[in-house]
Image (cartoon, rainbow, N blue to C red):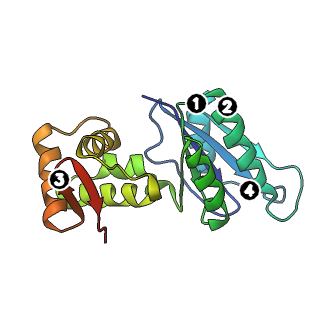
Amino acid sequence: MRTNYVLIDYENVHVDALAGLDAEHFKILLFVGASQTKLPFVLAAAIQKMGTRAEYVKISGNGSNALDFHIAFYVGQLAAQDQTAYFHVISKDTGFDPLIQHLRSNKISVARSSSIADIPLLKASNAKSASEKIEVIVSNIKQRGAAKPRTIKTLSSTISALFQKQLADEELTSLLAEMQSKGWILINENKVSYALP
């Protein structure tokens, strides 16, 4: 499985734990502001337990958006080193969104989430019911903007990848049928168009 880098803006989002990120394919970078001097013990222990898969990035100076610029730099640097990686920026700061759109237009897999629990990969792995899975699919497709899958084959492979290829063919077909019955996807021959909620 490809590496998923999770870059956490700790000035903006205070996390107490790293639930769900203990798998080998996750690497964590916790960005801490210059004036932040304390972290919860549970968080520090979780990062220590991850060993080389997690690190702190302490910002040395203060300034408007200083931490955001550091995150942007690290995404660029890591994307140059690992072109197959997926990047998760954990921040409530919507100022990242234009950068994320630009990165996506350059074929870099990246998303911003307001919390660790909102990471699409974690939401997908935690979804049990069909309605939860459809919610994950719709959210993922909406995030793609103009780059939505346009054929049934591409949509099927996108959904399969979203759920780490753990869906049976029958379940995938059922999820597509449910979305079609709700009118959220329209299939004409092999082409797909969307009317997402």
The reply to whether dot 1 and dot 2 touch (C-beta < 8 Å) is: yes
Whether residues under marks 4 and 2 lie with C-beta atoms below 8 angstroms apart, the answer is no
Q: Is residue 157 above or below residue 113?
A: above
Q: Are marks 1 and 3 in contact (CB under 8 Å)?
A: no
Please give left or right for residue 185 compared with residue 94 in the image. Answer: left
**Earlier-in-chain disc, 1 versus 3:** 1
Q: Secondary structure at mark 4?
A: helix
User: Are the residues tagged 4 and 3 within 8 Å (C-beta)?
Assistant: no
**Residue sticking out furthest to the front:** 189
Q: Quadrant of residue 16?
A: bottom right
Q: Position of residue 1 (x, y in %)?
A: 42, 28
Residue topped by disc 1: 83
Residue 68 disc label? 4
Question: Of residues 24 and 48, which is closer to you in this image?
Answer: 24
**Camera sees residue 87:** yes
CA distance for labels 3 and 2 = 36 Å
- Which of the labelled discs sits on residue 175, or is there none? 3
Q: Nearer the N terminus, badge 4 or badge 3?
A: 4
* Residue under label 2: 80
